[in-house]
Image (cartoon, helix red, strand yellow):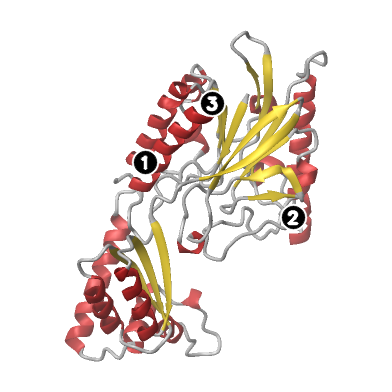
């Protein structure tokens, strides 16, 4: 049986309020064809299916449409676990219906740990794999809160709770083995392992508030022949072990991930030994970051235009200039081209806006309107009428964002 491991789809995620459904749809269409061509028998989706706990309607449509097409690829089983971005109740709601289609979902830990274990059978009814589908373990799932605990004690209990949970699941899976004909035991999880690699700005969250509970990948993988992890967006191994894998997100979640080759992982067992191969995912939209003073950034943009590059672009300006002048300049430069500028950052303006005016002031002590007012000051906008118009526009934009329908496409 060939197994495909993927994770961290984050369906519904936007980039600076730009919708990305075309990319998600293109990836899922590619994945269906890829699974067919590779004759995948088992799909493992290791959490963060959606980007929020209230996924938009379009994101839900993409997810369920994909699940409805799995059987057409020849894939016999699929196992989905909840990640820290997912709503456990939302994922679990259709689990009985999906289970009838051999699609098994574990949105959250339950009182019965056996709910996380699935014995998968071939067309003749013989066991071919045991999957231990451990979802993202929330604090309340794995430790008891005690008064007066120190942060170090909380972290120790969290790590111990996570390790004990995986050890218990592995032991239960061993009880289900037919020792006359052992089958591979596959662990799944959504967590942060020690020494894992991340990229600044990739959107990967710490999982436990006030904690550095990064678990030992080797410790949690004991008893498993392959460990299918999720949470980190960069494809990598964990614990210096080839059998403990993060496939990473299938599309770049932000400009910080733009240079990465996105991947899915295929695992095939030969006498209980996994043969593992990584396969690149096509790039469905170019993301390009441009940084420097206005002249340097302009030359880079002009080079992209000359090559007829189609991309979303983020520009980071490092020289002093009025925000309105920068925007007008680059809007004019990219007009009628294949480039879309998603964001223009002015580092100097940002630094001036958040510079404390008193010794005890912090960014947390300012509301967003005060920060915006300081941006206007730093940009040299002193005309009362122009300032009032910009403040009104900002207030309207902020109100629109607050009141936006989270289920809107």
* Circle on res. 401: none
- Could you tell me which secondary element the residue under label 3 belongs to? loop
Residue 112 visible (yes or no): no
Q: Residues within 10 Å of mark 1 (few under 14, many from 20)?
A: some
Relative image position of residue 189 (x, y in whole percent): 65, 40
Q: Earlier in the sequence, mark 2 or mark 1?
A: 1
Residue picked out by circle 1 = 25
Indicate which disc residue 39 carries: 3
Tell me the residue at 30%/70% (across/down).
306
In the displayed structure, 194 sits above or below 256; it is above
Q: Nearer the viewer, mark 3 or mark 1?
A: 3
Q: Which residue is mark 2?
A: 155
Q: Measure the alpha-carbon separation of dots 3 and 1.
A: 21 Å
SS class, disc 1: helix
The CA distance from mark 2 to mark 1 is 39 Å
Residue 394 in percent (x, y) is at 27, 72
Figure check: 286 above or below 120: below
Q: Position of residue 63 (x, y in %)?
A: 41, 35
Quarter of the image where one finds residue 245: top right
Q: Nearer the viewer, residue 67 or 88?
A: 67
- The residue under the point 41% across, 26% down is 69
**Residue 326 on image: x %, y %:** 30, 81
Count all numbered tags in the image, as a single digit. 3
> Which circle, 2 or 1, is nearer the viewer?
1
């Amino acid at each position: 049986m060939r197994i495909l491991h993927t994770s961290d789809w984050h369906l519904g995620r936007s980039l600076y309020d730009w919708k990305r459904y075309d990319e998600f749809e293109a990836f899922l269409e590619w994945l269906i064809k890829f699974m067919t061509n590779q004759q995948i028998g088992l799909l493992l989706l290791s959490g963060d299916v959606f980007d929020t706990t209230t996924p938009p309607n379009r994101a839900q449509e993409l997810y369920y449409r994909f699940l409805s097409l799995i059987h057409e690829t020849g894939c016999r089983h699929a196992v989905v676990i909840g990640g820290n971005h997912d709503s456990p109740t939302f994922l679990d709601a259709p689990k009985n219906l999906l289970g009838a289609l051999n699609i098994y979902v574990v949105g959250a830990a339950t009182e019965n740990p056996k709910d996380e274990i699935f014995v998968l059978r071939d067309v003749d009814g013989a066991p071919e794999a045991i999957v231990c589908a451990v979802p993202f373990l929330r604090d309340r799932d794995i430790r008891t809160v005690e008064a007066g605990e120190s942060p170090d004690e909380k972290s120790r209990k969290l790590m111990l709770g996570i390790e004990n949970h995986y050890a218990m699941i592995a032991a239960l899976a061993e009880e289900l083995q037919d020792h006359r004909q052992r089958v591979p035991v596959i662990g799944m999880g959504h967590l942060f392992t020690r020494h894992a690699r991340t990229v600044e700005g990739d959107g990967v969250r710490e999982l436990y508030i006030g904690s550095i509970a990064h678990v030992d990948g080797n410790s949690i993988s004991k008893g498993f022949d392959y460990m299918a992890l999720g949470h980190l967006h960069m494809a990598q191994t964990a614990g210096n072990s080839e059998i403990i894998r993060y496939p990473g997100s299938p599309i770049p979640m932000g400009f910080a991930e733009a240079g990465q080759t996105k991947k899915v992982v295929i695992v095939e067992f030969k006498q209980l030994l996994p043969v593992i191969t990584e396969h690149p995912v096509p790039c469905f939209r170019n993301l390009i970051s441009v940084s420097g003073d206005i002249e340097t950034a302009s030359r880079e943009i002009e080079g992209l235009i000359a090559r007829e590059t189609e991309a979303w672009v983020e520009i980071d300006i490092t020289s002093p200039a009025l925000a309105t002048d920068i925007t007008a300049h680059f809007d004019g430069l990219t007009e009628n081209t294949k480039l879309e500028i998603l964001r223009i950052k002015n580092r100097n303006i940002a630094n001036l806006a958040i510079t404390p005016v008193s010794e005890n002031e912090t960014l947390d002590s300012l509301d967003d309107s005060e920060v915006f007012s300081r941006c206007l000051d730093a940009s040299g906008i002193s005309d009362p009428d122009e300032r009032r118009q910009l403040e009104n526009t900002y207030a309207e934009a902020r109100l629109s964002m607050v009141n936006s329908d989270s289920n809107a496409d």
